[in-house]
Image (cartoon, helix red, strand yellow):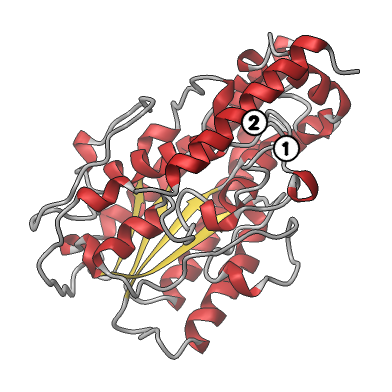
Amino acid sequence: RFRVMGQAILLLMVAISTVVGLLNTHASPIDKCPQLPAHNTTSVFALHPNDVKVIMSMGDSISAGFGMMGIDGWETFEEFRGWAAVSGGNEGEITIANFLKHYTPNVIGASLGRHPPELPYMDYWENDKLNGAQSNAGIDTLMFQLDYLVKQLENNPNVNMKEDWKLVNILIGANDACILCWEFPRSTISEAADYYEANLRKLLDSAYARIPRLFVNILPMFNVSQVYYVTANVSYCADIHDTIPFECTCAFDSTTANRIYLDSVLQAYNERIYKVTAEWKAKKLSSFAVQIQPFTATLRIPSVSFLSTVDCFHPSLLANQQIAIAGWNSLITPFAQKPKTFKPNPSLVCPTADTLIYAD
């Protein structure tokens, strides 16, 4: 049952999404940035933004752009991959892929358009390009996504597998943690983290062996239980979460202990991400790097406008746009200076001739 206040808030959220979408059709913040001089490197430690020729993603429904546009008729429950923060390639959209295209127009891999949800191990749509993310994916399904990406790279005549620099973004862990809420007895936090780490190691080992000149960009998981607090006074969201609590039962649970368990698991995943990444950095390989953008680990959802009106859970278009800008800024910042928190409404940083995609 939808209450009057809930309907009013829903209409407001839809209006916000619509306005943001209209504004986005005019200009991207990258348009103000001057072009960079030609560059060609053989070392990942000298990688410039315009050296990247291929953009890829692995992950779940967040990276696939599920429900981003909110309540939208028949297309409400689709994946809006062309608008996704990292790999979205729709013309003029605010995405990292399009920021790269500003400097290298023929960048390969950006996803386009929208389509119904694509679950783990399902066939990919043609317009997915090199966005291998699939809704409801967990860490143990990323090998399937990697297999898909490798096959696409090898079969694309425009990709020089040995010489082209490739960037792959990984954001994964929400489904791994949320599914634990259904377990009885539940896995311990250490057991959950061990499983996550083992699969991450397997994935990175395989990526290193199969994809030359690869920069792996990892976004750590934020505390998912925030949606409980952000939507607590939004009656429309409360109705949705009461209707479909299975999306992430612990996140919508009024029992504090369950929400603490969920976030503790996610933070344990992040600790393992840092551990594994540090080991790869210690190798100092010239053609393969694993890097973390720390700001997502402590990300605080600023308001309900950052959540989709479909489920008050997935990121909205506004969230995707701001994460794209924040992610870009972090990508071209040395590790010691990378922002440790997310600040709403970030201004895009224009790279200079000396700017790197930092592997330090």
Instruction: Find numbered disc 1 in the image and state the secondary structure of the residue it sits on.
Output: loop
Whether residues under marks 1 and 2 lie with C-beta atoms below 8 angstroms apart, the answer is yes
Alpha-carbon span between mark 1 and mark 2: 7 Å
The reply, left or right, for residue 215 in relation to residue 16 is left
Instruction: Find numbered disc 2 in the image and state the secondary structure of the residue it sits on.
Output: helix
Q: Check the image and report above or below for 146 versus 71.
A: below
**Residue type, mark 1 in image:** Ile
Who is closer to the viewer here, 27 or 306? Answer: 27
Residue 14, disc = 2
Q: At 78% across and 44% down in the image, what residue appears?
A: 73
Residue 194 placed where, x, y %? 59, 43
Residue 185 placed where, x, y %? 83, 29
**Residue type, mark 2 in image:** Val
Residue 71, disc = 1
Residue 309 placed where, x, y %? 69, 31
Who is closer to the viewer here, 308 or 192? Answer: 308
> Quick check: can you spot residue 258?
yes
Give the quarter of the image for residue 123.
bottom right
Q: At 85% across and 31% down in the image, what residue appears?
A: 244
Q: Compare marks 1 and 2 and give the one earlier in the sequence.
A: 2
Q: At 13% across and 71% down in the image, what residue appears?
A: 39
